[in-house]
Image (cartoon, grey):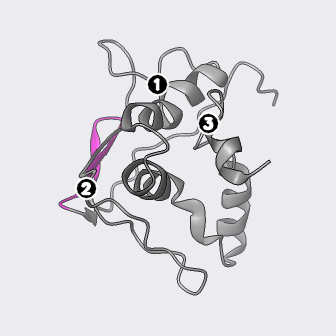
Amino acid sequence: MSRWRYSNHGYQCATTRRGRRRTVCWARNTRIHARTARSPHILRKYVREEHKLSLEDAIRKFSALPAQRMRLTDRGVLKKGMWADIVIFDPATIRDKATFENPNQLSEGIQYVLVNGVSVVENGKQTNALPGRVLRGPGFVR
């Protein structure tokens, strides 16, 4: 099965696959895979360039679908009373810049990112804010 056919499956999430491995790599201070910026890559390649995925379907694969599959009932959609991380980007310019030689580069075309209501990217530049927190679904056992 080709990589695209797998990604195009209606229930394929675009953001939950690498979380644990990425954390381990950062903790060991080793090189990470250049495609950890998966969302900008998908938006550039499959939405804007190849037209194989609609912008709405891509956003669903980044937000509502992972929240639903992980049973995070208070996340995934913009709705009163729910938690939300918001990314404001330009669909015409968003692209991943990471390479295997230099994987820790910010993607282009992202103007603002709000995490738990706190700005972590302003005008395309990272702030020093760290408002995120670990989310654990109903299957978590300590």
- The magenta span reads 112-123
Q: What residue type is labelled 3?
A: Cys
Question: Which image quadrant is residue 123 in?
Answer: bottom left
Q: What residue type is labelled 1?
A: Gly
How far is mark 2 from mark 1, CA to CA?
24 Å
Q: Where is residue 44 in the image (x, y as percent from the top left)?
A: 41, 57
Q: What residue is drawn where x is 33% and y is 55%?
A: 129
Dot 1 lies on which element?
loop
Q: Where is residue 110 in the image (x, y as percent from the top left)?
A: 28, 56
Q: Report which residue position mark 3 lands on.
A: 13
Q: Is residue 113 visible?
A: yes
Q: Where is residue 74 in the image (x, y as percent from the top left)?
A: 48, 16
Q: Is residue 7 left or right of residue 60?
A: right
Q: What residue is drawn where x is 82% and y is 27%?
A: 141
Dot 2 lies on which element?
loop
Q: Quadrant of the C terminus?
A: top right
Q: Report which residue position mark 1 lands on.
A: 76
Mark 1 neighbour class, 10 Å CA radius: few under 14, some 14 to 19, many 20 or more: many
Which of marks 1 and 3 precedes in the sequence? 3
Q: What residue is drawn where x is 54% and y is 76%?
A: 103
Q: Which mark is residue 92?
A: 2
Q: What residue type is labelled 2?
A: Ala
